[in-house]
Amino acid sequence: MSNIPNELRYASTHEWVRPEGEGVFTIGITEHAQELLGDMVFVELPDVGDEVGAGDDVAVAESVKAASDVYAPITGEILEINEELADSPELVNADAYGDGWLFKIKAEDPAEIEALLTADDYAGSIEDE
Amino acid sequence: MPNLTVLHPKHLAAKAKMVDFFGWEMPINYGSQIEEHHAVRQDAGMFDVSHMTIVDVTGNQAQQYLQYLLANDVAKLQKKGKALYSGMLNEQGGVVDDLIVYYFDVSNYRLVVNSATCEKDMAWLNQHAKEFDVSIQQRCEFAMIAVQGPNSKAKAANVFSAAQREAVADMQAFYGVQAENLFIATTGYTGEAGYEIIVPKDYACELWQRLLDAGVKPCGLGARDTLRLEAGMNLYGQDMDENTSPLAANMGWTIAWQPQTRNFIGRAALETQREQGTQQLVGLSMTDKGVLRAGQKVKTSAGEGVITSGTFSPTLGHSIAMARLPQTNEQTAQVEIRKKWVTVNLVKPSFVRNGKSVL
């Protein structure tokens, strides 16, 4: 069973969301997702300032095995992207919930996060796969 | 129930991620495919290839039989232990399988064929053996370990007996020798120096452990695929199959057209294909971001083709692929990647040898 931190929220498409306060949320892909994909070779990120809607494909995580779309779990504006990933995509494998974060969103409606899965819900959803 | 190699417990102990490979439960990686890839290019890695099929062909007409069965000519093999790569074709000139044949004498050869094609190959070998004085014997009592990389021979020497070290001391590339309990061959599927070692099953786990202790890193099928693709080596079922001419699979060099009098299965069809021309298997190199993948469409002004194998090359740091295309002299092609057409370079289908780029 892979690591699913309790303090985060999740999308069924394997993104995690961490509230940073003041309506800002950090987003990455889960430990489970990086395990499925294997060694990451490229991560294509959105541009800072992009307006994104919940469910939009906004990034691509490309591994030795496959290219996988990453979806925005909430609506808002891209505030920051993880520049480190350009040279070190393997951070997603090594530290999916830490240094391997993908981007930050300034949420249009911070309450939107309540609709996302809890750690328990997400654990249940990947068991059914 | 999947087939398990005798080394299966060693893979589980090393926390390998196991996958189904044509009915065999095999390690895809032991943590990081890219680290395993680099271990083979820079140091020494080992693969469990026990799922592959070993077949001994013996008898008075072993040479004639193999001369008829294979597109390459075993009569080229004159020195004991010498190996030859060949396609085994059907009457339509399609590739039934690709294999390595080792020569001991004109009545004694050993074949190593693919695992996914084992049943089909055995049926094919037996069917054509009927008209020859030969005996076909599958050797299921062995496991096989490939040890590959610039330091692999030095590290493997630590686990060999004195007699085995002596037997391989001056062995050139593409030879095999039986030395005590091991058949040790200077062959491989990575583009690096190394050995493929055929070992009795009851000694395989101990040999694996001794290689581990000697500093050889276990590597899975994932790294095996990126290594062979960098080396420009075909994968059966992906880069060619029964419906592919060897001429359209970069295997023209493995066809022995001379002597004209040698009849082999598929010869007539191949001669027609040679006259009429076939598609070609080319290399693709893309230095932009993104990864070329099998199945993606390729366009040149000569027409459309398809990527047969594609990957991210850990050695080169960008994507490479093999693609089957209509003949062309162009330097570039267009590939459709995730609904966008991208320009890539057309190159010879060989990318890395002995740790270095050959682009």
Image (cartoon, grey):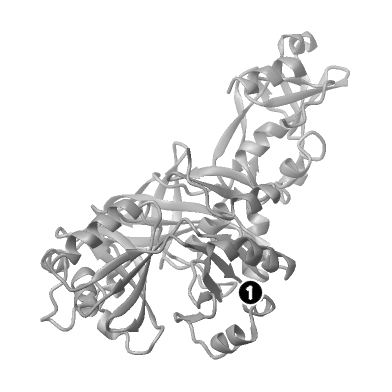
Residue occupying the point 14% across, 60% down:
B91
For mark 1, what is the residue? B152
Nearer to us in this view, B265 or B122: B122
Q: Is residue B313 above or below residue B252?
A: above
Q: Position of residue A108 (x, y in %)?
A: 75, 13
Q: Position of residue B233 (x, y in %)?
A: 43, 65
Label 1 secondary element: helix
B324 with respect to A55 (left or right): left
Nearer to us in this view, B354 or B196: B196
Q: Is residue B298 above or below residue B354?
A: above
Image quadrant assignment for residue B95: bottom left
Image quadrant assignment for residue B253: bottom left
Q: What kind of residue is marked 1?
A: Ser
Q: Position of residue B331 (x, y in %)?
A: 39, 63
Q: Position of residue A84 (x, y in %)?
A: 77, 46
Residue occupying the point 18% across, 63% down:
B128
Q: Is residue B42 above or below residue A90?
A: below
The residue positioned farthest toward the front in the image shown: B202
